[in-house]
Amino acid sequence: MKKLLLAMSLLVAANANAQLWSENFNAGIPSTWIQIKNDNNIPLSSYFGTVLTPALTNNAYANYLTATADSSLITPSYFSPTGTASRWIISPSFTVPATGNPMLSWYDYTPTTGNDFIKIMISPTASTTASSFTTSLFNAQCTNDFTKRGISLAAYAGQTVRLAFINENNNKRYFFLDDIAVENVANTLDASIDAISFPRYAANNTKVTITVSNAGVNTITSITANYKIGTNAAVSQTFTGLNLMPFQATTLTFTTLASGINTGALTITGTITQVNGATDPNAANNVKTANFTGATQGVAKSGLIEEFSSSTCAPCASFNATFDPLIVSNNANVASSRFNVVKYQMNWPSPGTDPSYNPHGLARRTYYSVSGIPDHFTNGLAGAAGDQAEIDASKADPAVAAITGTYYLKGADSIICTVTVTPYITTTTPFKLHVAAVERQYNYTGTTSQTNYVRIMRLMFPDGNGTTLANLTAGQSQSFTFRAKYAVGSVTQNSYNFWANPIGSDMVAFVQDNTNKDIIQSYATPASTTNVNSIENISSLSVFPNPAVDYAEVGFRNTVTMNVGVRVFDMMGKMVFEKASTTYESGLNAIQIPVNQFSNGLYNVQIITNNGTLTEKITVAK
């Protein structure tokens, strides 16, 4: 669970804190915890399933296994018919320490589609009746990432009390509650640096981010911190406008980008120097260091998102309803956008009949250990919200490698790809090159509301496991050529067939660190057909005028009598015009295209001959 990662760092930061008691619910709900269910609502069975529905019909809370050997409490607010929850769970009685800084801490989580609130009340008399809980300590929306939270119990020092965790939500979803504890915090003011985020391989102008948390009692409103690369001068910044409650964490990004990076092994150190304008009284948790390798240069990075989805997955359809228009509007897999997407269709959930599922997608699923969908990875690491901010961040830092390539369709059934990787780092760390043929768009009716599919992987070269690169040496390129046969139509599970002519596809190549899965660069190029000079009996070809308004002509000079036809495809691979193959005498000939019937945009014009197929691009600008 995500909460465990943060919890580990906070335990280091707060190692001087004395924990009085805690409950993680891994052994179930203890009998000393009292439940009160005032509503008669029935959780929506299609949402909560056959196990949780009866448990949450009869109880205010239920125990839920959220990870291996790690359970949480769950309480619902999604009912059929709809209704307002009134569900309590009450802690055993305990005495709040008379001295020190006593704090209540817990973790909570709600899905973004629910946004449930959690309410915490206290009974100063330690009674178990709801009416004895006279004071509200906390009432706010749960977090979306199992974040540790806390409130002070100092006002009840020396008193024996009980705590109630209350669900009063109406027609939302549910929330998880876990790792409830009462601890005596050592310092009233204490900022902790929990991590410094910096790429394993980096060039100048890379951003520096630190994760900080409040390990004390008082709210943190400002932090002064610095970072230092090797023996370079420290770069300091004061971050104001903060509102960090106890145990709360946040990320801070320095406005000054990294500079002075030399080649080879280096360190970067982040240090907190002040909190709320004063020296932090606990210096033990104020420093974090990370190791990295410096690059000889940096180049513009093309970010990559890999998504796992299925035509039988309702949550996938919901996610793609907003994600797909977003990636299309960002011109995913167009080189100038510096943003690429590869989607792998899976064969679950039931009935698991997505025809685009094949072993190459399975290999990528196995590589990332994907157990639930929808899921996505950005530059090889766990994805975030799937929004514009994530896309922008994916290409914000410079890359430490360059990729170029070609993607040719030869004849009616062959693909030839070439890829060249030029690294700007020297390392023996194992890297792999992955190359995918990605169909831009097709329509298919599965078991969900989704019928339009975009940026779907159809095959990979040589397969889903990729190609192992030789040890990287800065400035030394490695080149590869891949060949494969292709077929169109009759797409079934475990096949690599395209839904339509692969002229409507792109090659996406990326280089991945095989130890931490970090993708250091990606590249995309559209399919094109064999170049003119390799087509026998065609000596010249042009499409004019370009841009075109009303009509365009395909002009060509053929040296012998031959059959020639024309097809026009939009950038999604949909054919918008076809001129059947016709016999043309040798000489200069032309075929007219009525572009006034097309929408403005870029189109592929495919010229089909007896000896091969040619492609040119044309822009329609009316």
Image (cartoon, rainbow, N blue to C red):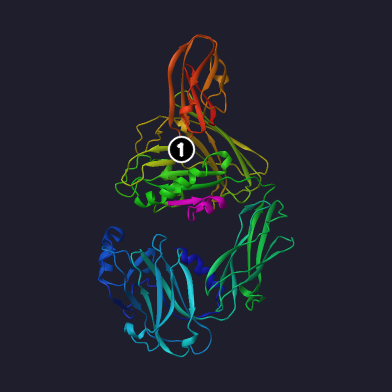
Q: Is residue 426 above or below residue 588?
A: below
Side (left or right) of 37 relative to 288: left
Instruction: Rate crowding at label 1 as few (under 14), some (14 to 19) or many (20 or more) other CA atoms within 10 Å.
Output: many
Question: Could you tell me which residue is drawn at 30 percent across and 77 percent down?
Answer: 36
Q: Position of residue 82 (x, y in %)?
A: 28, 64
Q: In the image shown, does 120 or 344 lie closer to the viewer?
A: 120
| Residue 341 makes an appearance in the image | no
User: Magenta segment: does it hold 167?
Assistant: no
Q: Amino acid at mark 1?
A: Arg
| The image quarter in which residue 567 lies | top left
Number of numbered tags placed on the structure image: 1
Where is residue 17 shown, x and y percent of the image? 53, 79
Foreground of the two, 270 or 583: 583
Residue 95 placement, left or right of 433 = left
The foreground one among 41 and 33 is: 41
| Circle 1 residue | 440
Residue 191: x and y in percent read 60, 73
| Magenta segment boundaries in residue numbering | 375-393
Residue at 53 percent of width and 86 percent of height: 100
Compared with 216, 378 (above or below) is above
Label 1 element class: strand
Q: Position of residue 35 (x, y in %)?
A: 31, 77
Which quadrant: the N terminus? bottom left
Work out whether residue 85 can be spotted.
yes
